[in-house]
Amino acid sequence: MEISVPRDVEGSFDPVLFVDAIHVKIRDGQVANRPVYVVMAVTVDGHRDILGIWAGDGGEGAKFWLQIFTELKNRGLQDVLMLVCDGLKGLPDAVETVWPRTIVQTCIVHLLRNSFRYVSHADWDKLAKALKPVYAAPSEDAATSRFLEFSETWGNKYPAIIRLWENAWAEFVPFLSFDVEIRKVICSTNAIESVNARIRKAVRARGHFPNEQAALKCIYMALMSLDPTGKGRRRWMMRWKAPLNAFEIAFEGRLAAARR
C-alpha cells in the first residue's frame, strides 16, 4: 500500500475518508491512554492514502474536528463523498461546516462491537441473529421496522443497546440507500484495519511513550513501512472498480466533475 504522511492533497477529491482511533499509553505526569486519530482516504484511482495523524485527549468535540478538516481543505482536499467513522462526538457538525455535501456514516462493525459490550456471552448468538435484519435491511424504512421488533424483544433486558443504536441512528442509516458495492466499502472501517494492526504492533513493542511527540513518531514510522511489495495496494485497487462505478451513479456526476 503506497502511503504518504501527509499526502499532497492540493486540488484533490476523495470519494471516501476513514477516521479511526488508536489508543496509546503516554506518560504525562502519569501513564494514561490517549487516542491518536488516523485519517485515511480512498482516492478516485483506488489508492489508500494516509492524510495525517493527530493526537487527542479523549474529550474531542466539534472544534477539534473542525481544525483537522479545515487543515485538510486548506491543503487542497476540495470534496469528499462519504466519511466513515466510529460515532466520534462533534465530527458530523464539523464535516457539515467544511464539506456540506459529505455524508457521515458510522462504522457498522464498531457499532456492533459496542453493542456486544452490554451482552452476556450466553446471548451473543441470539443477539447477533436479531441485529442482522437491522443493518442488512434493504431500506431505511425496513431497518426501522426491524429495529422496533428488536427493541420489543430485547429492550427490557438490554436497554443500553437500544439507546446506543438510537443515538447512532442518524449516522447509521445513510448506507442503506446505496448499492451493495458501496455498502461493502463504507459499512466498516475494515479498509483501515490493516493499517491499525501495524500501528498496534509497533505501539505494543514500546509499551508506553514519554510524550505525545514520541508516540506520533512511532506511529509515523510504522505507517511508512506498510506494504513494501505493493501487493496490498494492487488487491485493493482490483476490488475498487465496482464500488467506483456505484459511486459514480449514486452521486450523480460528482466523480466525473472531479476528474475534469
Image (cartoon, rainbow, N blue to C red):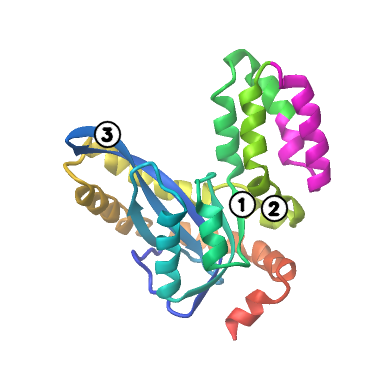
Of the 4 image quadrants, the one containing the N terminus is bottom left
Q: Is residue 140 left or right of residue 105?
A: right
Q: Are marks 3 and 1 in contact (CB under 8 Å)?
A: no
Q: Amino acid at mark 1?
A: Gln
Q: Position of residue 185 (x, y in %)?
A: 61, 54
User: Sequence-wise, which precedes: disc 3 or disc 1?
Assistant: 3
Q: Nearer the viewer, residue 75 or 206?
A: 75
| Predominant SS of the magenta segment | helix
- Cα–Cα span, label 1 and label 2: 6 Å
Q: Position of residue 68 (x, y in %)?
A: 41, 61
Residue count near mark 3 (Cα–Cα under 10 Å), binned few <14, some 14–19, many ≥20: some
Q: Quadrant of residue 127?
A: top right
User: Sequence-wise, which precedes: disc 2 or disc 3?
Assistant: 3
The range drawn in magenta is 131-156
- Cα–Cα span, label 2 and label 3: 35 Å
Q: Quadrant of residue 82?
A: bottom right
Q: Position of residue 17 (x, y in %)?
A: 52, 60
Residue 229 visible, this angle: no
**Tag 1 residue:** 105
Q: Position of residue 245 (x, y in %)?
A: 69, 68
Q: Are marks 1 and 2 in contact (CB under 8 Å)?
A: yes
Q: Residue furthest front?
A: 63
Q: Quadrant of residue 141?
A: top right
- Cα–Cα span, label 3 and label 1: 29 Å
Is residue 249 on the magenta stretch?
Answer: no
Q: Check residue 32 in the rendering and tell me which mark sits there, or answer none.
A: 3
